[in-house]
Amino acid sequence: MIDPHQFPFDAQCHPEARAAHRITFVAQDCDENTAFAALQGASRHGNEFIEQALERGAPFVLTNLDVPRALKVEDATAALRQWARHQRDQHDHAVIGITGSAGKTTAKEHVRAAVDGVCTPGNLNTLNAISCFLLEHATITPAPLVVEMGIDRMGEMQELVALVSPDYGVVTAVGEAHLEFLKTVENVAREKGVILQARKLGVVSQRCSHFYPGLPTYGFEQGTFQGKNLNFDPEQCHFQFMDQGVTVPTTSQVVAEAAVLALGLASELKIPLREAAERLQSVDVPGGRFRVHVGRITVIDDTYNANPISMRASLENLKHYKGRKLAVLGDMLELGPDAAGFHRSIGNFAQQYADLVFSVGEHAAQLSAHPQTDMQALIHTLKQEVRAGDVVLFKASRGVRLEQAVQAIKEAFGV
């Protein structure tokens, strides 16, 4: 329970404030078990929504105002994070932090399964979201905590590490992501590398090991955590890890690498590998992350997000499929002044793995020889071009809303 009367720092607690199971900074998510942290947002302050939170039954409100059921503090944001760090220090199981330019949510879900732990939900990987997670779980969950940690500005990872204090730190990938704010890939590597200051072990994917020479690695080459004999079936892959045979329901090599990481960390925590491998067979990664739908055609929905490194990984995975291969690509956002060049490079790369490439968005002309003017034009063209037996990959940043085309094509072909 998150008990406002046990707040470990200076505060005034309203006598009617009650303990909560959870805490959120989104007032509409409040209920009789979920408290409200009234934080300063990008454009509005949480104090504006206190009445809504109380009406929904919030057990208490973390705020700097005198209101019913208030845990009154000087600065709600600072108090939330201080309280979360205090609770994290009471946790007596492993805390695993995961970051990367791509693949961190996939890695998080596989690690959670392998170590039989609890992880941050969805893509809630910011300072405030992680603080809420730690307050909910750190002192009452008798299992490892797996924390996804995302950044888009300089210095942010240092703040996250100070909050989470991970025992194990992981970097899944380094590439051209958030360059609008981080400017260079070298800055991305430096910032994300702060997580490798973890208490016990820092480990990096072999895909980005050149940024971190000498550190432990995971993947399917020589490394600290090494999978062997990787092979793919139409809907799954198989490999060996140590003396354990492993089957994972994926045709994505990046997902297979995440499974290797998960088993490596399970071995570090002395968790039986057979049990860890069995749990990996039922991992359900949140939607839009290389979801494969099989019917008259095979639709690969990888529309959750995109940057050059994740684009290349998705396109490479087409080599595991038989039949004609189509790539449907959209803009990659937040790439800064060199965005056109990055899109042109991905367009050239896509031709190596796809028989046909279609594109939509501001940079559609750089992505393919078949740019479409808008989403409806794209959907119309695909309905005319796609035929039975095709494999169709959809990949773009979330802002493109390429999932609309995914849904339209699935419906048109009964997938």
Image (tube, rainbow, N blue to C red):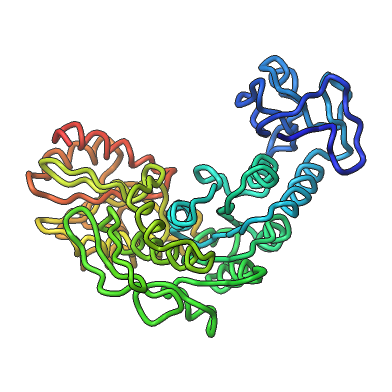
* Of 89 and 232, the residue lying toward us: 89
The number of discs equals 0
Residue at the image point whose x is 11% and y is 59% from the top: 322
- Toward the left, the furthest residue is 388
Residue at the image point whose x is 58% and y is 59% from the top: 96
* Of 88 and 359, the residue lying toward us: 88
Please provide percent x and percent y for residue 15: 88, 21
Whether 406 is drawn above or below 101: the answer is above
- In-image side of 44 versus 146 (left or right): right
Could you say which quadrant of the image residue 256 lies in? bottom left
- In-image side of 65 versus 143 (left or right): right
Residue at the image point whose x is 30% and y is 39% from the top: 374
Does residue 266 appear in the picture of this structure? Answer: yes
Please provide percent x and percent y for residue 40: 74, 37
- In-image side of 175 versus 372 (left or right): right
Does residue 175 appear in the picture of this structure? Answer: no
* Of 390 and 57, the residue lying toward us: 57
Please provide percent x and percent y for residue 405: 27, 38
Whether 52 is drawn above or below 1: the answer is above
- Toward the top, the furthest residue is 55
Image quadrant holding the N terminus, namely top right
Image quadrant holding the C terminus, namely top left
Could you say which quadrant of the image residue 22 lies in? top right
Whether 198 is drawn above or below 314: the answer is below
- In-image side of 297 versus 81 (left or right): left
Please provide percent x and percent y for residue 392: 20, 49
Residue at the image point whose x is 27% and y is 53% from the top: 249
